[in-house]
Image (cartoon, rainbow, N blue to C red):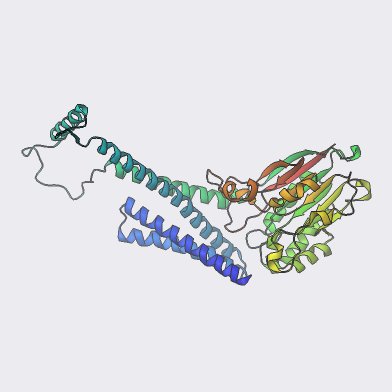
Amino acid sequence: MIVRFVVFFVVLLSLLGAIDWFVHKRLALVFALSPRARQILGGLLVGGLVAMVGSRVLGKTWPSPLVEGLGVLGAGIQLAALVAFAVLVLERLAAALLRGATWLARRGERPVTVGSGVALATAEAVTTAKESLLEQEAAEPREADAPTTRSDDEAPVLGRRQLFERAAGLAAVTLGTGSAGYGAVYGRHDYVIEEVPVRLDKLPVGLDGFTIVQLSDVHLGLFVGDQEIESMMELVARAKPDLIALTGDLIDSDPRYMDALGRMARRLGEKAPVVAAPGNHDYYAGIGPSLDTLRRAGVNVLVNAAHHPSPRHEGLAVLGVDDMWSRRYGEGRGPDVERAAADLDPDAPRILLCHNPAYFAEAAPHVDLQISGHTHGGQFNPGVRPADLVLPYGYVAGRYERDGAVLWVNRGFGTAGPPSRLGSAPEVTRIVLTS
């Protein structure tokens, strides 16, 4: 597993370095930056990458507000560079298309052979060329009128192509810094409660209105601490849960936050019974200690197992399965919904906790509702949501249906990777069951 992580980070850093190099090269050329300005821009980009990676390393030995601030700043610079890269690449593609169209237009005006002679393609092309030549001559100053000297301070006149490139460069800088700054400072704390009514035909009438509050992808660590947990507790109290469901990735990756996990779980348990299923980051932090911490805090941990919330809620089964990636770490058994549901009444409504929504394709025939997380809703979506193109089945955020079952994908409460969110507000889900 260590080798896999090393390879992943080497590839990631190489990719980010290439993006930074391209952005630096294009902006320096487009804005005709001086050598000093180029050095400053290069230092900013390199410093952002170093701060983003360095904060992760330092955070494991010296967690502090300063390290957190460096991480937020570094991630913001890298995200700004990423957005700028996308804009600048689009500008280059547009320029290439324009050049191609111009070449085709000129090719259409070339002379063509007719018999043994040569004729112009069209009389219209000849007329247009003559008119352009006359206009150019008229626009040029006569020798007598031309100035004999030119001031060194006189700004050169920019052509249309240069103006387009500078407009694209300005858009890249503005969109990049604006979106990254918003996501890092405000977007990652813009918490919302998502109200999700779900009708279950098998639900007993006495359980109509039963409320499950789902929390997923908290990522306790350097960027999610006491302040964020206080916001969580306020939202959970407002949601008035009958049951709280935790769907994995509760710790980011650092096992030193186990105590914080225990405190969070105990506080949640004061509001309602708590059930949980593991996620891939819980394996990164150590799955044994993670699940033991939850159990000691009174959480009912479900790993390929089922649970009835309480005798009062008999007739409702809550299932939980292992994470889909668990076999990669040599510690997990992998998800097995059939094993979890083996001893259940076939007529009881079944709610499945599964961290990864991709499992819904296999679980749908066996459950009525699956609640998942893992995707963060794409987390950073600057006008588009790239996750739609890469995630299995397109399960990114919100509600989906398959084989008569419902899937809800929670956008997560914390952040993974860069501490920033855009177009994907952090979420506490309030699921209300109706019969």
Confirm whether residue 58 shows in the render: no
Determine the image quadrant of residue 286.
bottom right
Question: Which quadrant is the N terminus positioned in?
Answer: bottom right
Residue 336 is situated, as x and y percent measured from the top left of the image, at 78, 57
Q: Name the foreground residue: 188 vs 214.
A: 214
Determine the image quadrant of residue 35.
bottom left
Q: Residue at x 59, y 46 (%)?
A: 388
Q: Residue furthest front?
A: 115
Q: Name the foreground residue: 113 vs 8.
A: 113
Residue 173 is situated, as x and y percent measured from the top left of the image, at 43, 49
Task: Give above or below for 110 relative to 375.
Answer: above
Q: How many marks?
A: 0
Confirm whether residue 265 shows in the render: yes
Q: Is residue 166 left or right of residue 425?
A: left
Residue 426 is situated, as x and y percent measured from the top left of the image, at 65, 49
Q: Is residue 127 left or right of residue 186?
A: left
Q: Is residue 433 left or right of residue 55?
A: right
Q: Residue furthest right?
A: 311
Question: Which quadrant is the C terminus positioned in?
Answer: top right
Q: Residue at x 72, y 41 (%)?
A: 401
Q: Residue at x 71, y 64 (%)?
A: 327
